[in-house]
Amino acid sequence: MTVFTEETRERAREIIARYPADRSRSALLPLLHLVQSEEGYVSPAGVEFCAEVLGLNKAQVGAVATFYTMYKRKPTGDYLVSVCTNTMCNVLGGQEVYDTLAEHLGVGHDETTADGKITLEHAECLAACDYGPVMTVNYDFFDNVDPQGALGVVEELRAGGRPMPTRGARLCTLKEMAVQLAGFADERDGAVADGGPGEPTLRGLRLAEQHGISVPGFDPNTPIRSKAEADKAAAEAKAKAEAAKPAPAAEPAKPEAATGSTAPDVKAPDGKSPQVRTAETRQPDAGTAVADAPGTKVPTDTTAPAPRDAQAAEAAGTAANPPAGDGKPAGDEAGAQQRNLKEAEAGAGANGAGPAVASETGVQK
């Protein structure tokens, strides 16, 4: 069983501190990258580690780890070579590139070479159709590849070299990349100074410069306003627009219907908000006039369920399913949230940073 280093635990605490203490489970995605940076994949020990520091159960962590393809569930090579075989790249030769690499390396999809250097995989789309066929090495692009060019890249990797991607910074191993995906800077000297944008990406900018097209009033030196400043400016602009509107003209009286009725119009049921419609569909009660979904029964001769009954049932279910187990999903562990809150407060006091902001609404802890 893997015992994570103290450096990894310190980084985990730093990741958790980025989020409000009562929302620490938001740190799960970068934490999964963090454990992958130490082991090369998300192992059962990594799942247990994330569950422990966040106060979740392993089923909740595993559900996230198995959803995203960037989290590997078995040991992966130093270099993950992904070849796009989707429609555009396939038409341009992507499948030939993949087949050539598979035959040369002696591995198939999601398999690793015997030396542990290369893991090969199909990729459904790498979002670079204008450079097809493309492949990536640890998510850095190699554009307009052909079978021989792809072979040259993997052979250089197996020989210990690090070929320069077409776009982006210099290559790093999958573990090094996972550290960056966890939110930590690449500390290699000049690592992010390499590479540059591709010409197809710059085509729109070139055309705009050629024809003098720009956004009206755009100033690249304009500082980014805070949310409070932006909201205030929007409110002032709205008030100014409202004040500039002319007074509405009096509407002519509507003639009465042939029946002589003066009853006000009643909004049709289809005009209900989606929230009301959803609430009535999920839990109709005696106040719901008409069911909004096929098969929904509206109780008319029974007492509507009390909200407290549902709350009590939910509380009892949470209490019966403590976290850090593989049984059933449960809510967040309050103890872990309190621990994260205390660590956040202690860190803020030690750094002299004052009270930490708990959320964007300005509530402070």
Image (spheres, grey):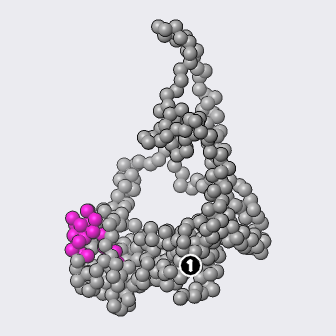
List x then y, in percent, for residue 17: 66, 70
**Rendered image quadrant of residue 151:** bottom left
The quadrant of the image that shows the C terminus is bottom right
Q: What amino acid type should be assigned to the residue bearing mark 1?
A: Glu
Q: Indicate the secondary structure of the residue bearing disc 1.
A: helix
For label 1, the residue is: 48
List x then y, in percent, for residue 261: 53, 11
Which of the two residues, 3 or 237, is positioned nearer the viewer here?
3
In the rendered image of this protein, does residue 129 appear above or below residue 120?
above
In the rendered image of this protein, does residue 111 appear above or below residue 317?
below
Q: Can residue 150 be spotted in the picture?
A: yes
Q: Can residue 162 be spotted in the picture?
A: no
Magenta-colored stretch includes residue 334 = no
Q: Classify mark 1: residues with Cα within 10 Å, few (<14), some (14-19) or many (20+).
A: many
Which of the two residues, 5 or 323, is positioned nearer the viewer here?
323
Q: Which stretch did the figure color magenta?
A: 81-98
> In the image, what residue occupies the spot 28% across and 83% down?
107
List x then y, in percent, for residue 147: 23, 77
**Rendered image quadrant of residue 159:** bottom left
* Residue 34 relative to residue 109: left or right: right
Which of the two residues, 109 or 49, is positioned nearer the viewer here?
49
**Rendered image quadrant of residue 74:** bottom left
> In the image, what residue occupies the spot 61% across and 21% down?
247
